[in-house]
Image (cartoon, rainbow, N blue to C red):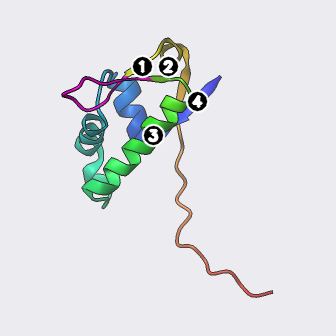
Amino acid sequence: MTRSLSPEFYSVLIEGNLNNFTVMELRDAIIREYKHETDMNLRDYHKRAYRVVLRLLTAGLLEKSKDISEFARYKKTPLFVASVFQQRVTVDRGPKQPKQPK
């Protein structure tokens, strides 16, 4: 099964091979790679990273571990390693047009 990731997460998780990370470490890696390309703030990056981690966790691609003194860490599972990922193509749809009354 082919899975897709947005370009920034593909770059960090697949090409950069980030593993055994916290959500904050993932967020920081994304910021290092893509901060100059977007106007998102730190909170938006964190929320986006958390949503992607939850999606991968639910799909069984990540495994959660937590020490008493640490934040939760996420490791790639064998299913993640065996999966084929492709970079999701983003399409600029331009500004949203208001709905016209019928």
Badge 4 marks a residue whose secondary structure is: strand
Q: Amino acid at mark 1?
A: Lys
**Amino acid bearing label 2:** Phe
Residue holding disc 1: 76
Measure how far apart labels 1 and 3 are at the Cα level.
13 Å
Across and down, in percent, residue 96 comes to: 57, 73
Q: Nearer the viewer, mark 4 or mark 3?
A: 3
Q: Which residue is mark 2?
A: 80
Q: How many marks?
A: 4
Q: Earlier in the sequence, mark 2 or mark 4?
A: 4
- The magenta region covers 63-74
* Type of amino acid at the residue the image marks with label 4: Arg
Crowd class of label 1 (few under 14; some 14 to 19; many from 20; radius 10 Å) = many
Q: For the residues marked 4 and 1, what is the alpha-carbon distance in whole angstroms?
A: 14 Å
**Numbered circle sitting on residue 3:** 4
Q: Amino acid at mark 3?
A: Val
- Eye-nearest disc, 4 or 1: 1
**Above or below, comparing residue 98 to residue 74 in the picture:** below
